[in-house]
Image (tube, rainbow, N blue to C red):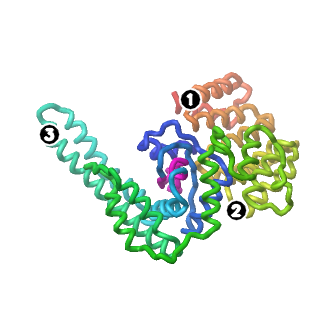
Amino acid sequence: MFKKFILFVGLFFSCCANASVVSDIEFDITVQNIIKSIDPKLKYELFIIKSNQENAFTTIDKNGNIIIAVYTGLIKSLSAEEFVGVLCHEIGHIHHKHVIKMMHLISKNKTTFNILGLLSLIPYINLIPMIILSAESNNLMIHSQQNEIEADIYCFNKLNQLKWPVEGIVNMFDRWSYGEKRCYFSSHPWSSSRKKMAEKFIVKSHKLPRNISSQYNQMQSRIKKELYEGGSLKYATSNDHESAWFNYLSYKYQINDQLKEDCIQYPALILKAKILAKQGKYEEAINIMDKVHSETKNMNALFQRIYWNLLFSTKISNKNLLEIQNYQKMNPNDSRALELFAYYYSKQNNRTAFLYYKAEYSLSNYNIKKAKYYINEIMKNKDKNKNSTFLLRAIELKKAIK
């Protein structure tokens, strides 16, 4: 249900327990523009994960909603041509429903794996179950390799359809093939064989659109220098846009000459709104962020606008609550919606509801100690709130985390 929970599969297998989500509107729009070009009808939630791992994956949540996750380590290491190829490949997995098929296959073999796993621990009779277990595991890996090939072919065909270059993928496979060690239980085919297959799809005249290349390169440069909220401001800035970000992240909320122009567009518009909010020019900041959301349909821009409306408005109404509820429906895996609910009810002076949503948000971030604290605060005044639905919810939550 929660934002970080859906990342569990990817983070577990990549051994990246301390990863965090980067909430940057400019990064989101850059990646979403590429995805929209590849598949305009695709519905998904995007997460950019701060991690040095070079990885991207697709998965689904418990309701079947599609998740696309991209690691900052991957963006740092790939050219624009290589990155669009990786996204194309991941969308290939979605197109062929590979995640659902693999989950079904694993579920079907779950009992067999459990029994064989237990038998393999028993001395003297453990050899046969271990051999069968290895064979079953290898069967899963073969399915996984077939999935990778199908996703690759989808990628190559889609790149050709868009008249985008395949050379980026070829170069990437070429790098990966150096020193590649074959594992018996490998989930991916040899990079060298994937490279040979990709080379058959090369069309020399195909080029990546300039706007995609420039936006990606700008995002990559900011990510390498960690010029984003939650980053650590590494290295010198290269242009006015990066300098403006550096000043903002250094608590210097100044509108430079680039941002003063009335005709500025995304992505400078996003930073201008953030600076105006820090300067106390709330209405102007909200209007700009509303414009960004209406033009890009970016969910981070919508979140920012809803949050600023709550933060800066003197009067809070049911309209604000409906906005939060709609945001949660559109982004079921974004736990920040729980923060919005908490803030709404704090403005409404509903302490029980405020504490309940703070408990929920703490749980979404695996902070059980904090969640228990908020629930205990609710229980201190339970006699005054006997008829509160949030008291009943808190009681159920307390039972669930015992």
- Specify the segment rendered in magenta: 56-75
Judged from this view, the residue extending furthest toward the top is: 380
| N-term mark: 1 or 3 | 3
Which of these two is toward me, 377 or 342? Answer: 342
Q: Position of residue 317 (x, y in %)?
A: 82, 47
Task: Decide: is 214 above or below 135.
Answer: below
- Within 10 Å of disc 1 (Cα), the crowding (few <14, some 14-19, many 20+) is some
Q: Mark 3 points at which residue?
A: 127
Q: Residue 368 carries which label?
A: 1
Q: Residue at x 79, y 44 (%)?
A: 310
In the drawing, does residue 108 fall left or right of residue 89?
A: left
Q: Is residue 330 visible?
A: no
Mark 2 and mark 1: Cα distance apart in space: 36 Å
Q: Position of residue 21 (x, y in %)?
A: 59, 44
> Is there a contact, CB below 8 Å, between mark 2 and mark 1?
no
Instruction: Specify the amino acid type for callout 2.
Output: Thr
> Is there a contact, CB below 8 Å, between mark 3 and mark 2?
no
Q: Element at badge 1?
A: helix
Q: Where is residue 83 in the image (x, y as percent from the top left)?
A: 52, 59
Q: Element at badge 2?
A: helix
Q: Which residue is drawn at 48% across and 72% down?
A: 158
Task: Decide: is 370 above or below 226.
Answer: above
Instruction: Specify the amino acid type for callout 3.
Output: Leu
Q: Name the residue under label 2.
A: 296
